[in-house]
Image (cartoon, grey):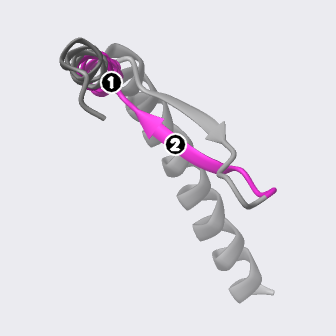
């Protein structure tokens, strides 16, 4: 009985400590614009979790825009010069 009481007390302390730590982590994550989304991949029905900060999402958006500009610029050059 004494061991069960000690075990229960230790479990309660660890649970409470974990909850206290989560609040600090959540506030840091919200300051950085941290967000998680579920995304489906081609060929699977199981979505995967993708987490990123606002800065990472902005950088990815800019990289995508630049890649699109470069690919469109190549297509226009081929059409003007008549190369395939």
Q: Are the residues flagged by discs 2 and 1 in contact, CB closer than 8 Å?
A: no
Task: Please give the label number shown on residue 43.
Answer: none
Residue ID at (41%, 26%): 34
Residue 6 in picture, x, y percent from top left: 64, 77
Classify mark 2: helix, strand or loop: strand
* Image location (x, y in percent) of residue 66: 22, 19
Question: Which corner quadrant holds the N terminus?
Answer: bottom right
Q: Which residues are magenta?
A: 45-68
| Quadrant housing residue 19 | top right
Q: Main secondary structure of the magenta part?
A: helix
34 vs 65, left or right, is right
Q: Where is residue 46, by image quadrant?
A: bottom right
Residue drawn at x 22%, y 24% is 74
Neighbourhood count class around disc 1 (C-alpha, 10 Å): few under 14, some 14–19, many 20 upward: few
Q: Which quadrant does the C terminus fall into?
A: top left
Left or right, residue 67 beside residue 9 = left
x and y percentages locating residue 43 in the rendered image:
72, 60
Which numbered disc covers residue 64? 1
Q: Residue at x 34, y 19 (%)?
A: 61
**Most extreme residue toward the front, as rendered?**
82
Q: Is label 1 in a helix, a strand or a loop?
A: helix
Direction from residue 57 to residue 59 in the image, left or right: left
Q: Earlier in the sequence, mark 2 or mark 1?
A: 2
The residue to which callout 2 is attached is: 50
Front one among 68 and 11: 68
Q: CA distance from mark 2 to mark 1?
A: 17 Å
Viewer-proximal residue, 10 or 57?
Answer: 57
Which of the pair 81/14 is nearer the observer?
A: 81
Residue mark closest to the camera, 2 vs 1: 1
| Count of marks overlaid on the render | 2
């Amino acid at each position: 009985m004494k061991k069960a009481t000690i075990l229960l007390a230790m479990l309660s302390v660890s649970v409470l400590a974990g909850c206290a730590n989560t609040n600090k982590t959540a506030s840091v994550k919200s300051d950085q614009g941290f967000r998680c989304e579920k995304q489906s991949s081609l060929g699977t029905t199981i979505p995967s979790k993708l987490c990123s900060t606002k800065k990472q999402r902005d950088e990815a958006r800019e990289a995508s825009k630049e890649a699109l500009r470069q690919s469109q610029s190549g297509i226009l050059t081929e059409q003007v010069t008549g190369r395939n």
